[in-house]
Amino acid sequence: MNLTIGSRHEVEIQRVAHGGHCVGRIGEVVCFVRHTAPGEKVIVEIRSIGKQNKFVFADAVEILSPSSYRIKPACEYAGVCGGCDWQHIDFAYQQELKTEILKEQLIRLGKLSPDNNLIKNLQVKQLPGDSTGLGYRTRVEYLTDSRGRIGFRKHGSNEVVTVNTCKVAREEITGDGFSNVPWAANSELRVVVGSSGEVVRIAESDDAEYRINEHVDSFNYQVNAEGFWQAHTLAPKVFVDTALEMLKIKLGEHVCDFYSGSGLFTLPLSSAVGPGGRVESVESDLKAISSLKRNTRNLANVNIYGLGIEKWFSESKVKKVDAILLDPPRLGAGRNVVRSIAKIRPSRVLYVACDPAALGKMQFSLE
């Protein structure tokens, strides 16, 4: 069989996979395919080949038998720029596919049984108020080509696909004012829109520090515009409300906020425990620490630690807490952090994960 880069093959798509792919087979070789959906028959073009030819990555270049859930993408660049994986799929069905992905990762990597109640009851839902998956993104990092036109990288490539607009970005940071402006060639441009509609533009050559104002419920934040903040305009409120609902924090409790960033959870946790409680807020990123200190400067019940979680455990004199919230980066918290959490035996632990594979690899064992 001619499994070479650029060769084309007919493939029947069997199921969805993590990372924007679906899975089919070319003979006995597993084929991970972008731009398709379960149940489709497609012609694929191989883009790369795995070790010992045991698997390949490919793009669907012709749809022979389309899924009933296939739609025309809202964005003309979908499937080209590499920024969106599922615009060719009905938005409601996307949630079903993402549910399958999350379950598969927790079963295969997390070693949970398919009969586990968590698995059986798991369901991915869109955020309240988002019925399209468009126009939500508050932070965009554009690249420019040799002529200074903005765009995004093509999937798996350094090639810049120039765009006139980005359908998933908020209107304030896309379209006119960005695509019709000559930016520096072969550079990066970060644009951010805050809760009140203010826009910050940061060119690659600009070393000034910009802040953006964010509001979540009654809490106000000043965030480094180059630092991390949830990119979905609706996500911060949903995260905060859900965290407080699940943790059921009581007045006077002692809680930890690990990987606290600019303090998204620190401020509501501080309010929840009250003057008689205490919040240990731990963050290692320097830009985030600067924002965190600014946002908590009037909160007497918050202790800030500018160091990694493992180092905090080794240096901290804290031996017991009531609850821990951790919101690690995409790679996850890691086994050592989880084991350290288990040793101090908090009554509640809430883990906020942004990557299903990292969540699946979490070691929840107390061993």
Image (tube, rainbow, N blue to C red):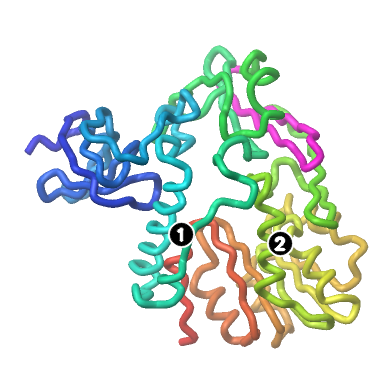
Occupied quadrant, residue 171: top right
From where the camera sits, is residue 283 visible? no
Choose the circle earlier in sequence order: 1 or 2: 2
Residue 209, given in percent of the width and then of the height, sits at 79, 39
Q: Residue at x 65, y 66 (%)?
A: 308
Q: Residue at x 66, y 20 (%)?
A: 178
Q: Residue at x 59, y 64 (%)?
A: 352
Q: CA distance from mark 1 to mark 2?
A: 20 Å
Labels 1, 2: front one: 2
Q: Residue 240, which numbered label?
A: 2
Residue 220, given in percent of the width and then of the height, sits at 84, 53
| Residue placed under numbered mark 1 in the picture | 356
**Residue 189 highlighted magenta (yes or no):** yes
Which part of the image, by quadrant, shows the N terminus? Answer: top left
Asked if disc 1 and disc 2 are in contact, CB closer than 8 Å, the reply is no
Left or right? Give the position of 299 relative to 52: right
For numbered disc 2, what is the local secondary structure? helix
Residue 87, given in percent of the width and then of the height, sits at 45, 36
- Front-most of 134 and 160? 134
For numbered disc 1, what is the local secondary structure? helix
Q: Return the residue found at the far front.
A: 68
**Residue 293 highlighted magenta (yes or no):** no
Tell me if mark 1 has few (under 14), some (14-19) or many (20+) residues whose alpha carbon lies within 10 angstroms of its own: many
- Front-most of 58 and 62? 62
User: Which amino acid is tagged 1?
Assistant: Pro
Q: Above or below — where is 184 with respect to 31?
A: above
Occupied quadrant, residue 341: bottom right
Q: Residue at x 70, y 19 (%)?
A: 177
Start-end of magenta stretch: 185-204
User: Which amino acid is tagged 2?
Assistant: Val
Q: Residue 206, which numbered label?
A: none
